[in-house]
C-alpha cells in the first residue's frame, strides 16, 4: 500500500504466478513448462542473433516472423499479431475488443489471468460456471451477448471442446469477439486457426511457452481477421512499439522451422501423460480427461492441499488453487518419464 498509487492500482487484484523457487532443486510440475529443451536450431538462431546489431531497435512489425508464420499456417501476414508472451496478447485484446458497457464471459474455472485483465480494464465479467464434469457449457456462452474468452483445451482442467461448439459460440453473436486461447492445443487438441477466414469475430491466441519450450523468451501470437489485427496494432503502438526483441524474433522464427522436433516432443509428453494417468487411476485418483501437457487430479481420501505441501517437502512442485469447486484438486504438469516416475512413486508413499 502506498498513498502514491492511483485508484486503479489500488483496486487491482494481480495474478499470482506459479513459483520459480531457488532454494533447492525441484521436480517442477507447477507451471506447465515443456520438460524438453528448445530445438537445437532455435538455440543456434538466438546465439547468432546476439551480435552488434543489438544496438539497433528490432523490427516493430515483425515482418520476417509473420511471413514465416503465414506460410506455416497457410494464412496472410495481416492475419497475425505478435506479442511479448500470450499474456500480453491477451491483455491487449481485452483492451482492444471489450468495453465496460457489455459483459465479457469466461468460465468460473479457467485461466485466472482473464479476471485480472477484466479488472484492469474495468470490464464486467460474466462468470459462466462449468458443469459438474468441468465441461464448458456451450449453451451458456451462446445465450448472453458480450465478449468471450475460452482456453481450448481449458486450463487448469485440460478438457477440450469440439470445433463445432466454437462455431456455435461464434455464430450466436457475430457482433462480439470470441477469443480462443490455444496455449495447449498442440498436445492433442484441434486448432481453429482455419476458421479465421469464415469468422471475422474470432481471435485465436498461441504461445511459444508450452509446446515450443520457449517460456524464457516471451513470444505469443494472435490470429484473426485483418480488422482485429489492425486494432491490436493501434493499441500496441500506443503503448510500446518494440515488444519483441531481436533475440526473441530470431528464436521464434527458427521454432517454426523446427516443427518436426516439437511435434515429436509433444508426442512424448502425450505418451507420458497417458502412462501417468494409468498409474494415478490405479491409486484411486480421479483424473479429468486431458488434451494438454498437464492433468487435473483429485483423490477421494486425501486432501489436495495436504498432498501439495507433502510433495513440496519431498522436492516436487505441483499447482494447488485454493478456490471453491477445485480446492480438492491438484494440477500436475507432465514432465519427463523419469520425473513422472518419481512423482508417481512419491504419491504412492504419501498414500501409504
Ligand atoms: C501459460 C498460458 C498462457 C500464457 O502464456 P505466455 O505466452 O507465457 O504468456 C496463456 N493462456 C493460458 C491458458 C496459459 O496456460
Image (tube, helix red, strand yellow):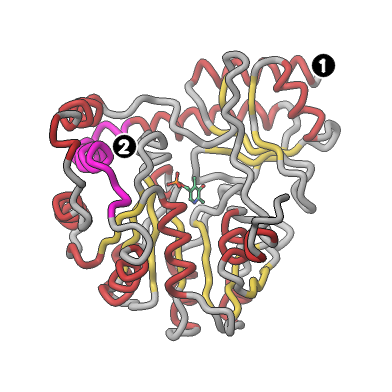
Quadrant in the picture for residue 265? top left
- Near mark 2 (Cα within 10 A), the count class, few <14, some 14-19 or many ≥20, is some
Q: Nearer the viewer, residue 174 or 10?
A: 10
Visible in this render: residue 277?
no
**Circle 2 sits in a helix, a strand or a loop, which is it?**
helix
Overall secondary structure of the magenta stretch?
Answer: helix
Does the magenta portion include 290?
Answer: no
Indicate the quadrant where residue 31 lies.
top right
* Residue at disc 1, secondary structure: loop
Dividing the image into 4 quarters, which one contains the C terminus?
top right
The residue located at (76%, 14%) in the rendering is 349
Q: Which residue is mark 1?
A: 352
Q: Is residue 236 above or below residue 328?
A: below
Tell me, yes or no, whether the two marked residues, 1 and 2, touch with CB atoms within 8 Å. Answer: no
Residue 177 image point, x, y percent:
44, 75
Q: Is residue 258 magenta?
A: yes
Figure disc tally:
2
| Residue 50 position in % (x across, y down) | 20, 29
Point out the residue furthest to the front here: 4
Residue 2 visible to an observer of this rendering? yes
The numbered mark, 1 or 2, whose residue comes first in the sequence reads: 2
211 up-or-down from 12: above or below: above
Name the residue at 22% across, 35% down: 258
Q: Position of residue 225 (x, y in %)?
A: 29, 73
Numbered range of the magenta stretch: 242-264
Q: Residue furthest right?
A: 301
* Vertical side of 143 occupied by 51: above or below: above
Task: Indicate which disc residue 263 carries.
Answer: 2
Amino acid at each position: 500500500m502506498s498513498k502514491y498509487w492511483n485508484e486503479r492500482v489500488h483496486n487491482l487484484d494481480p495474478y499470482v504466478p506459479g513459483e520459480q523457487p531457488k532454494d533447492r532443486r525441484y521436480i517442477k510440475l507447477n507451471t506447465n513448462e515443456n520438460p524438453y529443451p528448445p530445438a537445437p536450431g532455435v538455440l543456434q538462431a538466438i546465439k547468432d542473433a546476439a551480435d552488434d546489431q543489438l544496438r539497433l531497435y528490432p523490427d516493430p512489425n515483425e515482418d520476417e516472423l509473420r511471413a514465416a508464420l503465414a506460410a506455416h499456417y497457410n494464412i496472410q501476414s495481416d492475419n497475425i499479431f505478435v506479442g511479448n508472451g500470450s499474456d500480453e496478447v491477451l491483455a491487449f485484446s481485452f483492451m482492444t475488443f471489450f468495453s465496460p458497457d457489455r459483459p465479457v464471459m469466461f468460465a468460473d474455472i479457467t485461466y485466472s489471468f482473464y479476471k485480472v485483465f477484466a479488472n484492469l480494464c474495468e470490464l464486467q465479467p460474466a462468470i459462466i460456471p462449468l458443469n459438474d464434469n468441468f465441461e464448458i457449457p456451450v449453451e451458456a456462452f451462446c445465450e448472453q451477448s458480450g465478449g468471450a474468452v475460452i482456453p481450448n483445451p481449458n486450463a487448469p482442467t485440460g478438457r477440450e471442446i469440439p470445433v463445432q461448439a466454437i462455431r456455435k459460440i461464434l455464430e450466436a453473436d457475430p457482433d462480439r469477439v470470441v477469443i480462443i486461447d490455444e496455449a495447449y492445443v498442440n498436445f492433442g487438441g484441434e486448432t481453429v486457426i482455419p476458421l479465421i477466414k469464415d469468422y471475422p469475430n474470432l481471435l485465436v491466441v498461441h504461445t511459444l511457452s508450452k509446446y515450443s519450450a520457449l517460456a524464457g523468451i516471451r513470444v505469443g501470437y494472435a490470429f484473426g481477421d485483418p480488422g482485429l489485427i489492425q486494432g491490436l496494432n493501434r493499441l500496441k503502438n500506443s503503448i510500446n512499439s518494440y515488444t519483441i526483441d531481436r533475440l526473441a524474433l530470431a528464436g521464434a522464427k527458427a521454432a517454426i522451422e523446427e516443427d518436426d522436433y516439437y511435434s515429436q516432443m509433444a508426442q512424448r509428453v502425450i505418451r507420458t501423460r497417458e502412462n501417468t494417468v494409468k498409474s494415478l487411476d490405479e491409486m484411486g485418483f480421479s483424473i479429468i480427461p486431458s488434451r494438454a501437457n498437464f492433468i487435473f487430479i483429485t483423490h477421494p481420501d486425501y486432501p489436495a492441499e495436504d498432498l501439495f505441501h507433502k510433495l513440496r517437502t519431498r522436492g516436487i512442485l505441483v499447482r494447488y488453487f485454493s478456490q471453491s469447486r477445485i480446492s480438492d484438486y491438484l494440477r500436475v504438469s507432465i514432465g519427463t518419464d523419469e520425473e513422472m516416475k518419481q512423482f508417481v512413486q512419491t504419491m504412492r508413499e504419501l498414500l501409504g
